[in-house]
Amino acid sequence: MTKLTKEEKVLLESAGVVPGQTWGGPQRVRYYAPDGEEVWGIPALREYVVKKDGKIIKQGTRDANLDRWSLSKPKVRKIHCLGCDGYHSTRREADKCLEKQQAILVEWNRKSRKEQPDDRVARLEEKLDALIKALTKEK
Ligand SMILES: [Zn+2]
C-alpha cells in the first residue's frame, strides 16, 4: 500500500471517508452521480501542474472522479440518459436525446443493410431493440 501524503489525507477526509472502515481494500468514498444516485468509488488521485510562461503557478493532487461525480448530493437531480449514457436536465431532453440516438441507429441500419448484409445489421438490430425496450420501459 502506498503512503498517503498529508494533502491526500485531508482530501480523503473532506471527501467523507469513514476512518477505520475496513473493507479489505482501498478506502472507498461516497460520491453522487448527477442523478443523485450514490456511487462508492476509490478516489482516482492525479497529480496536476498548472504552468504559465514556463513557471509552475499551481500544483497539487486532484480526484479525477470529481469530473463525473460530486461529493455532495446534487440539489437538482439530472436524468440519466440511456441514449448517450450521460445526464440531462429534463425528462424531455433525455427523451429527445434517446429518440435522436434511435434515429441515428435506424439510419445506420438502413445504410449498412445496403452496404453489407448479415453480421453488422444483426448487431445493429440488437442495439436498436435494446434502445426501443429502454425507451418504452422508461415511460
Ligand atoms: Zn442523452
Image (spheres, grey):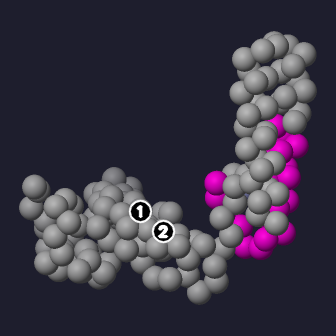
Q: Which residue is mark 2?
A: 69
Tell me whether circle 2 and circle 1 mark residues in contact (CB < 8 Å).
yes
Cβ of mark 2 under 8 Å from ligand 1: the answer is no
Which residue range is magenta in the image?
85-105
Instruction: Reply yes or no: does residue 103 show up in magenta.
Output: yes
Q: Residue at x 77, y 60 (%)?
A: 137
Image quadrant where residue 2 sits: bottom left
> Which residue bears the numbered disc 1?
65
SS of the residue under disc 2: loop
Give the amino acid at mark 2. Answer: Trp
Residue 88 point in image, percent of width and height:
71, 67
Mark 2 crowd level (few <14, some 14–19, many ≥20, 10 Å Cα):
many
Answer with the quadrant where ligand 1 appears in the image: bottom right
Q: Quadrant of the C terminus?
A: bottom right
Q: Does residue 79 belong to the magenta stretch? A: no
**Number of marks in picture:** 2
Magenta part mainly helix, strand or loop? helix
